[in-house]
Image (cartoon, helix red, strand yellow):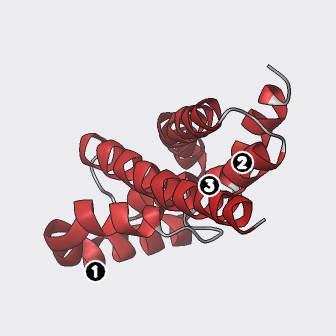
Amino acid sequence: MEHLFELIVVCLVPGIELRGSIPLGALWNVDPVVNILVSIITNIMIIPVGYVGLNFFWKYLSQIGFLDRHVQKVRARTKPSLDKYGFLGLAMFVAVPLPLTGAYMGTLLAWLLGMEKKRALPSIALGVLAAAAIVSTIVYGSITALNWLV
């Protein structure tokens, strides 16, 4: 399938993710179902990889005193809000189809706030699905409307 590799690469770029890959896939005439599914799957794969990477680097960065104290302070301060709004709030944050609100930032935010991985992963995945639905509706709805007008 032509442009599939490029679609995956674009989806892996932090800050762009499926918000850029779905419109590009439509521009490249990739089948809409393939475009959306590849973008969703690629974007969701970022979540566990991100957690593993963050935990790996934190082993070393946590040895820097002021960083560890700052992260612990942030986690303590946000715990009540996280307990109350965490799952839905994180999903809504990831779902907003703007740059820097996707799976990368959602994973970083969940990790930084100390959200349990088993709670964060489905929340971020739900946000990715919602973002894909929003972006796909806008992109393919616009294409349909323009075709209708022309």
List x then y, in percent, for residue 116.
Answer: 27, 48
Question: Horizontally, is 59 left or right of 77 in the view?
Answer: right
Identify which residue is drawn at 62% across, 29% down: 34
Q: Which residue is mark 2?
A: 21
Label 3 vs label 1, nearer the camera = 3
Q: Quadrant of the C terminus?
A: bottom right
Instruction: Decide which of tag 2 and tag 3 comes sooner along the chain.
Output: 2
Q: Secondary structure at mark 2?
A: helix
| Local SS, label 3 | helix
Relative height, residue 88 to residue 39 (above, below): below
Please name the amino acid that badge 3 sits on.
Answer: Tyr
Q: Residue at x 63, y 38 (%)?
A: 32
Rounded to the nearest angstrom, the CA distance separating label 2 from label 1 is 36 Å
Q: Amino acid at mark 2?
A: Ser
SS of the residue at dot 1?
helix
* Disc 3 to disc 1, C-alpha distance: 42 Å
Quarter residue 15 falls in: bottom right
What residue is disc 3 on?
140
The quadrant of the picture occupied by the N terminus is: top right
Number of numbered discs present? 3
Residue 142: % across, % down: 65, 65
The three-letter code of the residue at mark 1 reads Arg
Alpha-carbon distance for marks 2 and 3? 13 Å
